[in-house]
């Protein structure tokens, strides 16, 4: 087995995850799935069994949290009983706690007391999915939900002490570390919903990660969450869309912030993107890379500044949807019913109009346009299938310049 270190992620061999396949969803009885654990201590005496002559396996003290019991567990495992998992993306700050053993305890208390921490396996357990079959109106459908039985709590550091257990090197081989453990223990406190009170536990520093909250980004998002206000932002170079059969490119888009959502230990924001017509969720720290100029009123638009006339119009004089309202090189937001009767909203840039008569003598009018929902490819839209049209003012300036 690959060398294992303190802070590595492991699980039992019957766990469906293996190395980097943590995207797998769990069916049947998900409660039979063991937790992802973090190595907190290692024993490696490099000794041999006197009866068999075989080397005595390394042993690993592994930690996890039981949500149903409301407490942390640690268990010893032999090397052949477990498998290592690759690290996954996290919003925890893992770097700061890596080198704390180089510092004295007084400095650590001054620096880290009252900070928030969480067990490093939090993202494995937060993103674990279970699937099940649901019957509704005679139809069977696969459903999924989060499997959170081992999700560790966010905790406050209330004390830091030196670990009574010490690292030990072999008396026979000075290069061999027989016992590896954290130099410091963090005393952590959290609210325990099982006991409806607060719990405390001493945990090795190396199995924890710091929870950081971007207050500035959170405050910015709070100010941006305004109804009917869109903000212009620049697409990354690899996100720019080049129109088919055109030299034009989509370089910018518009978004409106819908929700700010707390996801256990970090904040997400959900926004609606006008060009893609999608709701997109991202962590709040990305707001600065997406919208660097949001404080400039030049990049802020209310809906009256973006959208023009809407068709069909039922004002004093009824105005239906016909080819005359589709001006070439202008942008429109349309509701369109496709061949399978699915209604979609999409932003298009009009190229021209096409008239077609079929073999039965029936006339059709098609709007030829670049469709942002289809990455700028040219599409032909049957005008009879368009149920709503909204003009977008100065679309070239909004999206291309």
Image: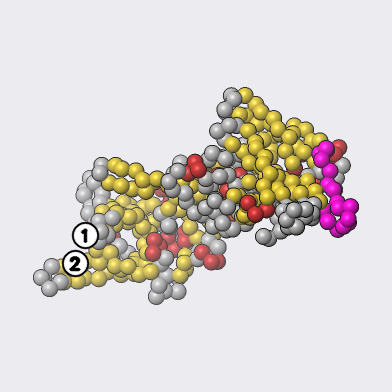
Residue 384's tag is: 1
Q: Percent from the top left, x then y, of residue 66?
A: 59, 36
**Which residue is found at the position 42% from the left and 70% from the top?**
243
> SS of the residue at dot 1?
helix
| Residue toward you, 350 or 204 | 204
Q: Position of residue 74 (x, y in %)?
A: 67, 40
Visual colour scheme: secondary structure
In this rendering, would 114 be left or right of 194? Answer: right
Tell me which corner region of the image, top left, top right, bottom left or bottom right, holds residue 184: top right
Please tell me whether residue 199 is drawn above or below residue 138 in the rendered image.
above
Residue reaching furthest left?
A: 360
Task: Classify residue 330 by image quadrant.
Answer: bottom left
Tag count: 2
- Is 66 on the left or on the right of 271, as rendered? right
Question: Which residue lies at the image location 25% right of the left edge and 51% below the top edge?
Answer: 312
Confirm whether the magenta stretch covers residue 166.
yes
Give the answer, above or below, for where 250 lies relative to 282: below
The label shown at residue 364 is: 2
Residue 215's disc is none
Q: Residue at x 66, y 28 (%)?
A: 199
400 vs 17, nearest the viewer: 17
């Amino acid at each position: 087995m690959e060398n294992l270190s303190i802070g590595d992620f492991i699980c039992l061999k019957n766990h469906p995850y293996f190395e980097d396949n943590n995207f797998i969803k769990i069916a049947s009885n998900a409660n039979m799935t063991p937790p992802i654990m973090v190595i907190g201590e290692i024993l490696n005496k490099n000794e041999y069994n006197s009866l068999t002559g075989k080397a005595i396996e390394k042993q690993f003290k592994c930690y996890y949290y039981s949500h149903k019991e409301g407490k942390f567990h640690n268990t010893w495992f032999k090397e052949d009983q477990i498998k290592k998992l690759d690290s996954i993306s996290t919003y925890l700050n893992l770097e700061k706690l890596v080198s704390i053993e180089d510092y004295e305890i007084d400095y650590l208390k001054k620096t880290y007391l009252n900070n928030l921490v969480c067990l490093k396996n939090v993202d494995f357990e937060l993103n674990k999915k279970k699937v099940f079959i649901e019957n509704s109106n005679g139809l069977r459908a696969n459903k999924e939900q989060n499997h959170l039985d081992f999700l560790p709590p966010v905790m406050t550091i209330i004390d830091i002490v030196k670990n009574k257990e010490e690292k030990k090197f072999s008396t026979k081989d000075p290069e061999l570390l027989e016992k590896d453990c954290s130099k410091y223990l963090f005393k952590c406190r959290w609210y325990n919903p099982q006991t409806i009170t607060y719990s405390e536990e001493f945990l090795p520093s190396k199995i924890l990660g710091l929870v950081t909250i971007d207050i500035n980004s959170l405050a910015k998002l709070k100010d941006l969450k305004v109804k009917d206000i869109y903000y212009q932002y620049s697409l990354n170079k690899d996100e720019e869309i080049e129109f088919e059969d055109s030299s034009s490119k989509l370089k910018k888009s518009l978004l409106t912030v819908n929700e700010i959502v707390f996801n256990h230990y970090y904040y997400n924001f959900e926004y609606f993107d006008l060009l893609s017509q999608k709701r997109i969720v991202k962590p709040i720290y990305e707001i600065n890379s997406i919208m660097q100029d949001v404080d400039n009123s030049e990049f802020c638009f209310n809906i009256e500044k973006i959208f023009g006339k809407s068709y069909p119009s039922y004002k004093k004089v009824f105005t239906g949807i016909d080819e005359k309202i589709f001006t070439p090189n202008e942008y429109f937001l349309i509701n369109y019913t496709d061949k399978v009767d699915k209604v979609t909203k999409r932003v298009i840039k009009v190229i021209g109009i096409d008239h077609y008569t079929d073999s039965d003598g029936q006339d059709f009018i098609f709007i030829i346009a670049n469709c942002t929902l289809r990455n700028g490819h040219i599409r032909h839209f049957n005008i009879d299938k368009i149920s709503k049209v909204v003009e977008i003012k100065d679309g070239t300036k909004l999206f291309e310049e």
